[in-house]
Amino acid sequence: MTERTEQQKKVVTRFAPSPTGFMHVGGVRTALYAWALARQNGGTFILRIEDTDKAREVPGSIEQIIESLKWVGITWDEGVDIGGPCGPYKQSERLDTYQTYAKILIGKGLAYADPYSKEELDAFRKQAEDEKRPFLYRNHRPENPPAWDGTTPLRLKTPEIKSYSWTDLVRGELSAGPEALDDFILMKSDGYPTYNFAHIIDDLLMGVTHIFRSDEFISSIPNYLSLYSALGIEHPHFAILPPIMSPEGKKKLGKRDGAKDLLDYRKEGYLPDAMMNFLAFIGWNPGDEREVFTPAQFIEAFKIEGIQRAGAKLNEEKLDWLNKEHIKLMSDADFKAKAISYMSDALKSLPTFNARIDAVLPIIKERINKFGDIAEMETANDLQYFFTDSSYESALLLCAPKQRKGKESMTVTDLVPVYENLKTLIESMSVFTPDAVKEVLWPYAEQEGRGLVLWALRTALSGKERSPDPFTLVSIFGKEEAIRRINIAIQKIHESAQ
């Protein structure tokens, strides 16, 4: 076992998940705050794997944990995959270390073998229940426990039965009475340590100075303090984080409420910087009006004092908004590469895709919150018409707003002159930007009725009831293609009249 020197300590934080399933937002937020504090102070951030509960371990979880953290932009200086001066960083590879410290406690008379069977413990619990008092193992501590040979649990002999007070960096002054203390298990009968024992030994040897953890651990801290006392060591700084609540805010977030695999957000097309920004704000704020942060800006702004005590709701509408803001920060080249990666091969193989995609990308950027929305646009046929002719009925063209007095519906007589005049105006253009197109076409739309003219032009060009404005469409298609599509529209409404 290797212990970090005093010179190496500075600020040392860690993230120590169990490999029992996918990473969700709560776990990654814990890692994020610990990482930010270490980075801000030029300290060390460690990734440690606490794999002592072999019955619940899920194959592939460690790889998923690493991939999730890396995707969101969290890096570590020491860890399970890269090693470091205080390794190994997987608890199942540190069993000799826990045995050593278990024997130290035994030698001090502060740990003993648990001699009771399950049936005996159940009887003790039943007796406490009948007497309407809490069950405490220390009330049944054996006077002459057998020597511990590793085949039975090893328990801490609580060194002092007293009240504890401690300072939490988020919650402030906290305390618990003697009823919170008990002789908890240090080593299990399978040879593995419990979390309550192993993480304290690891934090000691790795020189961890600050521990961020979720609120369900508050009730266990008095027992941790009793173990620190038994070992004769100072405990690190504690920071209990606020719970992440369901979107409705009425209960803690669970899998049924949207606590999904973090990598699902990647599949849905969220940007890692936006996800980091989102996670940071679930229970923290910078103390000012800023909401959009790059990773570097978050590290600079992070303060433990900004972490709130009350629960914070998971608000994916806020995530959508933040992701859109981060999309705006992308370079044109990066946006293009990312957007195209979410497009189908069928779309990318359409005749004019390469010629028009650069002109279409600003429309996509305006309409999406995340890159996965591009697939939804394809499903709704909201992209294909840019690159190939749309298939639509003449009835769509004849649905133009009834702008002319006395007209009950649009007819060939109404629409063909409009299209012919639009063709003439487009033919006269030499500059094809949305503003230049609008300057030429707007006076005619004002004269004939904006609803009629703009509907007619937009539906002829897109074949869609909803699409970008017609000035943008003309600028994308250019003179020849715009006129060709208008001619198709004229042909369709003539055919409908026959």
Image (tube, grey):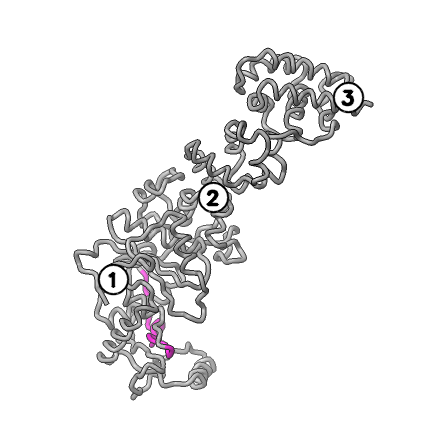
Disc 2: CA contacts within 10 A as few (<14), some (14-19) or many (>=20): many
Q: Of helix, strand and loop, which one carries label 2? A: loop
Q: Quadrant of the N terminus?
A: bottom left
Residue 328, numbered circle: none
Q: Position of residue 190 (x, y in %)?
A: 38, 77
Q: Is residue 41 left or right of residue 248?
A: left
Q: Is residue 246 left or right of residue 466?
A: left
Q: Quadrant of the C terminus?
A: top right
Q: Give the residue at mark 1.
A: 86
Q: Position of residue 114 (x, y in %)?
A: 35, 82
Q: Is residue 161 left or right of residue 482?
A: left
Residue type at mark 2 is Tyr
Question: Where 93 sits versus 30, above or below?
Answer: below
Residue 168 visible in the current orientation: no
Q: Give the residue at mark 2.
A: 270
The residue nearer to you, when weighing 169 against 73, is 73
Read off the magenta span.
174-190
Q: Is residue 131 left or right of residue 113?
A: right
Disc 1: CA contacts within 10 A as few (<14), some (14-19) or many (>=20): some
Disc 3: CA contacts within 10 A as few (<14), some (14-19) or many (>=20): some
Q: For the point 72% across and 28% down, which residue is it?
A: 396
Residue type at mark 1 is Cys
Q: Give the residue at mark 3.
A: 494
Residue 86 visible in the current orientation: yes
Residue type at mark 3 is His
